[in-house]
Image: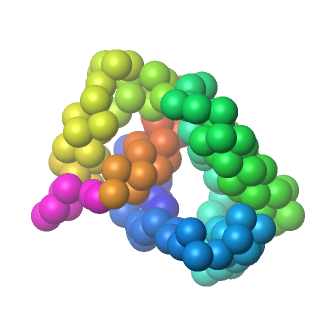
Amino acid sequence: MIECFRNDYKLIAKGAVKTTTKQDFPARLLTIYNAIHSVIETYTPAILAIEKTIYAKNIQIALTLGHVRGLLVLAAVQKNLAFAEYTPKEIKASITGNGNASKLQVQKMVQSLFTMKEMPTPHDIADALATAMCHFHRSRY
């Protein structure tokens, strides 16, 4: 979660939703939905920006990502949030200047942009912050 005003931005919150394989899939989806809903209630964002799923290593991962994306869209729509999607290449190019940047390069740039003492891990956190920054850059023009 970032806050942006003119050319200034700051990190408000970061985190990752953790589930366990001990839960069945519907229970895991509910955990994710409740966490997203809680973040929206707590921080009242104006927009939800997410990464478009372009590629997945296998069909099962793609289907799982589709379910989670559906939860994100549902949570945004329920709260009347604006919604934006960006491809991985758009996000990487916006943050690093290189649409083919590695995960490590994105992590390092996010760390630098937000003057974080440590690199954001897992890489999902860096990806989420990079997506937010991509939206910030794109919406200014």
Q: Is residue 99 magenta?
A: no
In the picture, measured across the screen, residue 36 lies left or right of residue 80, that is left
Residue 9 location (% of width, % of height): 38, 54
Q: Which residue is drawn at the image coordinates 71% and 41% (left, top)? A: 63
Q: Which residue is drawn at the image coordinates 75% and 57% (left, top)? A: 71
Q: Nearer the viewer, residue 115 or 33?
A: 33
Q: Nearer the viewer, residue 65 or 14?
A: 65
Residue 46 location (% of width, % of height): 66, 58
In the picture, measured across the screen, residue 27 lies left or right of residue 3, that is right
Residue 89 location (% of width, % of height): 46, 22
Residue 95 location (% of width, % of height): 34, 33
Q: Is residue 119 magenta?
A: yes
Position of 13 relative to 135 (above/below): below
Q: Which residue is drawn at the image coordinates 65% and 45% (left, top)? A: 65
Read off the magenta span.
Answer: 115-121
Residue 37 appears in view? no
Position of 79 relative to 83 (above/below): below
Q: Which residue is drawn at the image coordinates 23% and 35% (left, top)? A: 105
Count of picture labels: 0
